[in-house]
Amino acid sequence: MLPQTLFVVASALTAVTAGPVRKRCSGSGGTPVISSSPLPGSSTTASATASSSASASAPATAGPTLPSTGSGTQLPTPSGQLQHIVVGHGIQNYTCAAPDSTASSATGALAVLYDITDLAPGAQGKSAMTETAWSSLSDQVLHKTDLPLNIVGNALTKYAADVLAPFKASPGADADLTMDGLSAPLKAIGHHYFDAAGVPTFDLFSGTQKLVAKKLNDTAAPAGADKGLLDTGAVAWLRLGDNGSGASRGLASVYRVYTSGGASIACSEANTTISVPYTAQYWFYA
Ligand SMILES: *[C@@H]1O[C@H](CO)[C@@H](O)[C@H](O)[C@H]1NC(C)=O
Ligand SMILES: *[C@@H]1O[C@H](CO)[C@@H](O)[C@H](O)[C@H]1NC(C)=O
Ligand SMILES: *[C@@H]1O[C@H](CO)[C@@H](O)[C@H](O)[C@H]1NC(C)=O
Ligand SMILES: *[C@@H]1O[C@H](CO)[C@@H](O)[C@H](O)[C@H]1NC(C)=O
């Protein structure tokens, strides 16, 4: 056996032992592709101190640092104060333009949003995760927990959600998310959906924060990102801002990062909706 082969085997084993569904590894040596600067120990959590005068001298970006994909064009640096970080779990919808077309177009998404702000590496809470656990949290939620939607399935996709009542509960009544390895359940704090006009919307249960959004920037997920339950690949990382209709409140932008799954499957039948499970972290700024 050549030394190089041994090296490949060894790094594959390292990747496996790092966690059964952790797949964000570079091709070269099993190091995570995702880079995210560690926080200085003295930094404060933006959400907890945003309005406190003590943070007046802190830079606007104090708190958890938005990850980058590690290569290619990056999303613009966030402005404003970080409000929440959530993991969204749901489906991405696609439809085929024509029966034999291989191009499916995105038509919408549905997800329940679970608060993970205090789990961010460097967060001051005692539940802060390691960078490794944090960067694979989306993968873990996708593979280890059930879709929090009323899944009915159909001939085309087993992950179709009920059209009239896709969410399991009315806003605010969703069950918290429990998962092996989490010290405490994750609180459901909002829904993501596309409204009747097809506009992506993030509606937080507090009633004081809502983002009626439009996509501003995107960048492909890292090559090693989790391909999801249907093995189609991870949806792009995004930046969305207010769509200008005046319906947003308390939120100015959201970033979708650490995506798992959700990319479109090959088209089969025209004018039918195909739903692909996904998870992602969403970082909300005001
Ligand atoms: C997405 O598809 C599901 C069926 O899986 C449907 O219930 C939902 O209304 C669709 N939403 C959008 C915005 O396309
Ligand atoms: C992000 O999107 C905005 C609005 O479309 C655009 O002006 C800006 O150049 C984009 N930035 C990057 C880095 O792509
Ligand atoms: C913004 O969202 C509202 C609400 O869905 C919609 O009526 C409006 O057409 C959207 N505006 C743009 C510019 O997309
Ligand atoms: C798909 O829907 C469009 C618009 O509703 C319609 O024009 C087209 O004929 C439909 N195609 C098929 C194959 O049903």
Image (spheres, rainbow, N blue to C red):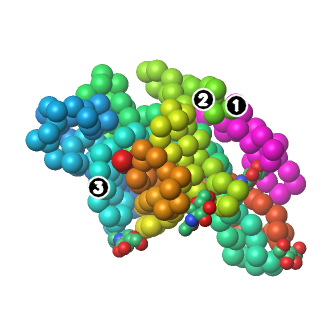
Q: Determine whether the residue tagged by mark 1 lies in a helix, strand or loop.
A: loop
The span from disc 3 to disc 2 (Cα, nearest Å) is 28 Å
Report whether residue 277 is seen: no
Instruction: Report the residue marked by disc 3.
Output: 79
Instruction: Find out whether residue 47 is within the magenta segment.
Output: no
The span from disc 2 to disc 1 (Cα, nearest Å) is 8 Å
Q: Residue at (70%, 56%) from the top-left corner?
A: 196
Height in image: 4 above or below 82?
A: below
- State whether label 2 is within 8 Å of ligand 1: no
Amino acid type shown at disc 3: Ser
The span from disc 1 to disc 3 (Cα, nearest Å) is 33 Å
- State ligand 4's quadrant: bottom right
Picture quarter with the N terminus? bottom left
Height in image: 131 above or below 214?
A: above
Image spot of residue 211 (x, y percent): 50, 50
| Circles 2 and 1 in contact, beta carbons < 8 Å | yes
Amino acid type shown at disc 2: Gly
Instruction: Report the residue marked by disc 2.
Output: 172
